[in-house]
Image (cartoon, helix red, strand yellow):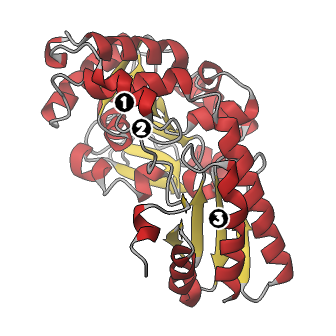
Amino acid sequence: MALNSLINPIADLRSDTFTRPGAEMRAAMASAVVGDDMFGEDPTVNELEAEAASVTGFEAAMFVPSGTMANQLAINVHTRPGDSVLIEAESHVFIYEAGAGAALSGVQFDCLPSPDFTSWTDRADALIRDDNLHSVPTSLIVVENTHNRHGGRVFPATGLERIRARVSLGKRLLAGSGRTLGLHCDGARIWNASAVTGIPVRELLAGFDSAAVCFSKGLGAPVGSALCGSANFIARARKVRKRWGGAMRQSGIIAAGALYALRHHRERLQADHAHARMLAACFQDLCLSHPGEVLGAKIPEPCTNMVYLQVRPERVQAVLESLQARGVLALTTGGGWIRAVTHLDVPASAMPAVCEAFKVAVLA
């Protein structure tokens, strides 16, 4: 295998975290005015946090190293050890965050399959637990938008409204009891949901008690996410961030990259979606023309920046190696599924070669 295919591939589709900062972003980082963020004195971090709060519609925001930390801080502040968190069964906080909810906050997860969760059926209502001698109380519901393992799917508006209504009812029922029922959005790719629907981010996050938003995925910053919420919520989260070792010092250098991304890279997400649609058309053709080799595809409507192709599980490694030999890197997520994610380092000019590489790899 040529080393060049890893160092300088035609397209690295493993994730939108593989972007590299461009000259303008690097210049912004190099010239960032910095201070000690632990003392609240890094002006670039403060500017980023204020802008993130404004864009998302919350009172406050806090810059953190990763989306996992943002989500887990939210879980920790919203819950007490022994509480239950209600989530969709393939949520990032459950699948990809290394058991942090249990290890760091002592919570259990109640997991619902997507149809019951994203449309909020009676089964979802039944899983909201009361606080009694035999049961742990449900204190948080987590929504992922867009949803990674469902192909970058935008969370259905009807289901979201039902969840908001259920949480609002829960808050009224629990008023004065000392218990809470919170609603958190894992909005790592909320920017993609906004770009494809035309709905402002603050409207997509209306009714949530907190949200995690990522700057190092579709927006292309090298590092960082933000946790957003009320001023009191963020003040409490800062204490936990310190406890977990996530508080940084002159972090304005990396915050400047995130701030540049927030200001300059949101509108260009439409290009990533267009490139994903090109790949989706290729995957659909393969599904129709070679049903024995291609078992399926995850292509939600609307299509954002990721699509999935399923081949026979025993063929996955061969397909990935064939892609790599042609300068295309992709990722397997198990069960024969191969994920391809478009981003700002994958230009339109690369897409014909990417599609051809998939055709050759699948049929080899």
The quarter of the picture where residue 22 lies is: top left
Question: Disc 3 or disc 1, which is closer to the eye?
Answer: 1
The reply to whether residue 179 is visible in this rendering is: no
Residue beneath the point at 59% across and 28% down: 266
Q: Disc 3 residue type?
A: Tyr
- Disc on the earlier residue, 1 or 2: 2
Quickly name the residue at label 3: 308
Mark 1 neighbour class, 10 Å CA radius: few under 14, some 14 to 19, many 20 or more: some
Q: Disc 2 residue type?
A: Pro
Q: Disc 1 residue type?
A: Arg
Residue 269: x %, y % from top left: 64, 36
Q: Nearer the viewer, residue 238 or 262?
A: 262
Find residue 21 and name its label.
2
Quadrant, the C terminus = bottom right
Residue 235: x %, y % from top left: 27, 16
Mark 3 neighbour class, 10 Å CA radius: few under 14, some 14 to 19, many 20 or more: many
Q: Nearer the viewer, residue 1 or 129?
A: 1
